[in-house]
Amino acid sequence: MDKNVPVDRKKLKKAVKLVLFNGFVVAFPMTLLGIYTMKLRGCAFSGDLPTFTRVVVELIMFSLVEEFGFYYSHRLMHHPIVYKYIHKIHHEWTAPIGIICIYAHPLEHCLVNMMPVILGPIIMGSHLSTTWMWYFITLVSTTISHCGYHFPFLPSQEAHDFHHQMFINCFGVLGILDRLHGTDIIFRASKAYKRDKISLSLTPMSQQYPD
């Protein structure tokens, strides 16, 4: 797999500028829209916190909604016309680093990165506390999936690394729709697939299953 060692500073500077733009300028109106929609939906912003069981159920539902929304919007981004003008920016990094998770065209950041995450709490009518917990989980998760390192005891980044390297396969988050649509066939035939699991060892997965 390609490596960014050392990271190209010129390329990184360009990425940081867009990441900051997406993280503040683009995300701000999207956040306001999300809050407004949650209020219309009747989501609680104060009062009693939800029970542990309710939180667990909602997090599971959020994950499924994100899988659906991200998979299909992400596949749309790979349509030749859309890819050329929008998604190609994100794929400038064939070996991504953490901040590249939101290095994308602003339209893509809204429709692919943010919308699938925001939809779950709105659909479920969730408490604000659960919503913020979900946002934190997704931000950490997408950062890990783009970091380029397979840390022990954390989710694997192998599938998304493979996607960035090959530009095909592994369009989803959980892998459910990739398996359903057969968009993980090449990935499952690769060595990276053997490494695609949570490591319970301090021995690097790249040494356990070398290319």
Image (cartoon, grey):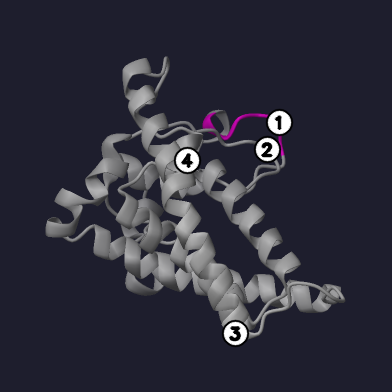
Q: How crowded is mark 2: few (under 14 residues within 10 Å), some or many (20 or more)?
A: some
> In which quadrant is the C terminus drawn?
top left
User: CB under 8 Å between callouts 1 and 2?
Assistant: yes
Instruction: Give the mark nearest the N terminus, 4 or 2.
Output: 4
Mark 4 falls on what kind of element?
helix
Instruction: Give the mark nearest the N terminus, 4 or 3.
Output: 3
- Of residues 88 and 94, the one nearer the viewer is 88
Task: Please provide the residue range marked out in magenta.
Answer: 201-206
- Residue 176 in sight: no
The label number, if any, that marks residue 41 in the structure image: 3
Viewed as shown, does residue 30 lie left or right of 35?
left
Instruction: Give the mark nearest the N terminus, 1 or 2.
Output: 2
Count the marks.
4
Discs 1/4, front: 4
Mark 1 falls on what kind of element?
loop
Q: In this view, does 4 lie above or below 172?
A: above
Cα gap from disc 2 to disc 3, whole angstroms: 40 Å
Q: Residue 139's x, y, as percent?
A: 58, 50
Seen at 71% across and 43% down, the residue is: 153
Report the residue marked by disc 4: 146
- Of residues 9 and 150, the one nearer the viewer is 9
> In which quadrant is the N terminus drawn?
top left
